[in-house]
Image: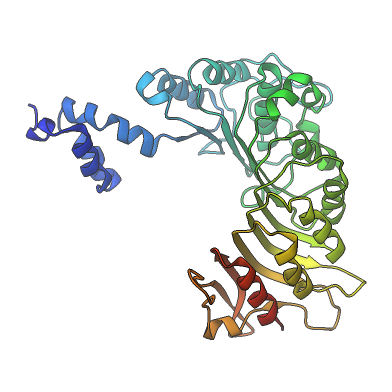
Amino acid sequence: MTSKLCTLAVELIEHIASVLEPLDLFSLRLVCKGLNEKTLHYFARTYLTTVQTDLSYKSLKELKELSAHEQLSHHIQTLLIKEGLNDIGRGFLWNRHPSDHLLAPLSGIQMLQDILLNNLVNCRSFHIYGAHAEEDLYESDWLTSSDAIAIILTIIAETSLPIRSFYVDFRKWGTGKVDAKRLHTLQYQKPEFRTAWTHLQELCLEQSMTLDTFDWALRLVLCATNLQKLTLDFEFDHSISFIDRLSSTDSFPKLQELKLSCAYVTVELISRFLLRFRDSLRALLFRHIIIDDDSGGTWISVLSNLRSNLPLLESICVNHLKEFKPGEKGRITFPALSDNPVVPGLQGGRFELIGKKFHGSPRIFGVSYCGPRMDVALEILARSAEYI
């Protein structure tokens, strides 16, 4: 039986769908075939832009079936690879090279490659989350998250697949470390890979930096010549060396957004690094950054210089800044902003404050601002910073 709702224009039905909770929308789509069809486009663009797989045979088979639906498949833009109820890659045989990386051709890699090339033509963003599996166990019937990284990068190298974003998130999940032995690094030096990687616009590396993965991670950043957004979370390992290498390279992408977390820096190093983006950077985030500087440099001087170093800046967020001063107070807070978070001037706006208890008392460790009066906001930030 057809509902009277079906007589409404598609635009009106989609407006109704937009105010429904997911379960209510699901119920609406079950009312009749007409409503199912008229809400299909809204459903797909709202709930199917990102799909998840654990690279198991069952999961890839389901992904293949979904991708065969022409009205749904072109909405899928992001593939999230994450451990599910079972280990990653179950249901396939994963042969390995004596050096421990996967040995192609493999049916699991080929199946995913065919899906991406033939069906999911708009899926060009990949997010890979760390898993709980031990990275030092090499099995033939399941994978680790480092293998998942290797699979995506291998497909890119073999097909020149142009991608928009690549996220490695090993800090929130799993061991935090990428196993370099699972990466087929020679593949990523091929011209086909470098060509595809120039399309990359967003890169996120949230992992413990090790000597084994240092050059691999550095190459991922530097080969992305059109990169616009970069997120680096080092877990404090080798951060000074990595940022120094980035800031010393002859060519570097003109970033518009930079997020830097869990790193040691010096005032000279962070200033030199930011100057690389003087003519492009519009958004900046510092989180858990420690100045380890024998020259006496301070966060107050860094914040003061941002006004002249980054004239195009439109958005800033600082949270848990610290200076390494043995025996001295080194945490930065912004207590004055609790009483007056307003940025003066026309359309000045307000600071967003990030608070946390410290020794039983509430403290403002983080501040964010987005607006046209960035010069005024940065001056207030530098002036209101205090040590505890």
What is the x, y in percent for residue 178? 74, 41
Number of marks: 0
Quadrant occupied by the C terminus: bottom right
312 vs 381, nearest the viewer:
312
* Quarter of the view holding residue 215: top right
**Relative side of 110 to 186, left or right:** left
Q: In this view, does 170 lie above or below 201?
A: below
In the image as oriented, which residue stretches furthest toward the right? 294
Q: Residue at x 48, y 24 (%)?
A: 58
Q: Where is residue 171 in the image (x, y as percent from the top left)?
A: 66, 51
336 sits left or right of 138 in the view:
left
- Left or right, 323 with respect to 53, comes to right
Q: Residue at x 9, y 32 (%)?
A: 3
Residue 340 falls left or right of residue 307: left
Q: Position of residue 340 (x, y in %)?
A: 53, 83
Up/down of 348 relative to 237, above or below: below
- Asked if 270 appears above or below 214 in the picture, the reply is below
Q: Quadrant of the N terminus?
A: top left
User: How has the structure been colored for display?
Assistant: rainbow
In this view, the residue in front, 100 or 203, is: 203
x then y, percent, for residue 287? 67, 63
